[in-house]
Amino acid sequence: MRRYSRVTGTGSYVPPRRLTNADLVAELAVKGVETSDDWIVERTGIRARYFVADGIYSSDLGLVACKNALQAAGLQATDIDLIIVATSTPDMVFPSTACILQNKLGANGGAAFDVQAVCSGFVYALTVADAMIRTGAANKALVVGAEVFSRLLDFTDRTTCVLFGDGAGAVVLEASDTPGILASDLHADGKYVGILCVPGHVSNGHVLGDPLLKMDGQAVFKLAVGVLEEAARATLAKAGKAEADIDWLIPHQANIRIMQSTAKKLKLPMDKVVVTVDQHGNTSAASIPLALDSAVRAGRIQPGQNLMLEGVGGGFTWGAVFLTM
Ligand code: ACO
């Protein structure tokens, strides 16, 4: 009998501090940075985002998301034998946020590691977990996207600081006789490192280089629109499916215009696209599992429906996963 992996529970969490565009505009004005609700909504679709308080880390956000996902799956933390955390904002340089999260969960003993593919991190992590489950290397996994991107933002740069937020999402992925994950397609092109990066690093007890986010928004936009269509088509081809088989498209939540353009290219109406960027902003690796969990808990996504998850981000990285819930 073939062995597959299947999502059996979803969970998410955002920190309590919610900033509407108006709140952020007011905070930035104090710093002499000019922006407006109209500009942010028109160019991005973002209306609000959540920021962590001091002393809260990606593992703390991931912990609540994982507890919610475990509850939905009817499992205990001790049932889990694999934790993969997709993050670009780890708690420490090392050990991995996955190890820290594993200990907070009380799921000690199984494999735990981080995946770093920026906003594509969740589809990368899900693909790795699926492969490990299919080969028998793991049976019950937590796949997590958790970020505190607010710590990477330059609040004097209006072209980036209005775009991002903090949060976490998680899924429980379990071995199953029936699919589950049907296909995935991952890519990277390192020649685009410079268009979206945080170039600083730790060296000899100091941070060398700039530890704040830098982005060429237009270059990212153009690349994102093209690769998201390609990845979706490649994944459908591998799964032996067509656009019409997609019940829900869950793209990385960076910008409503990128999502609209991707949906149009795939001939999908916007009511088949899960959109949470308006409420969360861009939460990088957390955005897809946050959107997924929101739609599951709202009763929009139903068991048996087909989902196309799509990530794109720094690296440049991109990819898609097609799965049946
Ligand atoms: N408020 C007001 N005005 C602003 C702001 C702001 N927050 N930011 C920029 N502007 C101004 C600019 O200064 C410029 O003014 P000018 O014409 O006088 O020079 C004008 O608005 C237009 O700027 P553009 O950069 O051309 O605006 P654009 O329409 O390209 O929108 C945006 C910018 C929203 C960043 C867009 O390019 C985008 O969404 N790109 C993709 C970003 C993305 O998806 N990033 C995430 C990838 S995932 C990851 O890995 C993190």
Image (cartoon, rainbow, N blue to C red):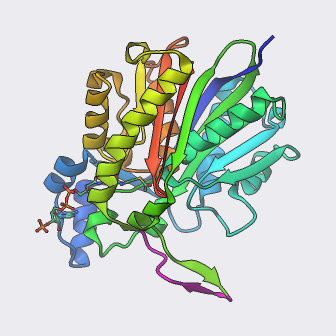
Give the quadrant of the C terminus: top right
Q: Position of residue 207 (x, y in %)?
A: 57, 84
Q: Residue lying at the far right in this picture: please name it.
A: 109
Q: Which portion, as a residue range, is magenta?
A: 204-213
Q: Give the side of residue 249 with respect to residue 182, left or right.
A: left
**Above or below — where is 73 with respect to 53?**
above
Q: Position of residue 240 (x, y in %)?
A: 52, 15
Q: Is residue 4 magenta?
A: no
Write down which quadrant ligand 1 falls in: bottom left
Which SS does the magenta portion mostly show?
loop
Mark yes or no: residue 66 visible: no
Depth order, front residue of 82/233: 233
**Above or below — where is 194 with respect to 228?**
below
**Above or below — where is 248 with respect to 14?**
above
Give the quadrant of the N terminus: top right
Depth order, front residue of 87/238: 238
- Location of residue 31 (image quadrant): bottom left
Q: Residue lying at the far left in this picture: please name it.
A: 38
Q: Give the side of residue 54 with respect to residue 77, left or right.
A: left
Number of numbered markers = 0
Mark yes or no: residue 93 visible: yes
Q: Position of residue 77 (x, y in %)?
A: 78, 37
Q: Give the side of residue 223 with respect to residue 63, left or right.
A: left
Which residue sits at x=36%, y=49%? 281
Q: Position of residue 324 (x, y in %)?
A: 56, 17
Which residue sits at x=32%, y=64%? 216
Which residue sits at x=16%, y=48%? 42
Which residue sits at x=42%, y=17%? 247
Depth order, front residue of 56/275: 275
**Above or below — where is 146 with respect to 320?**
below
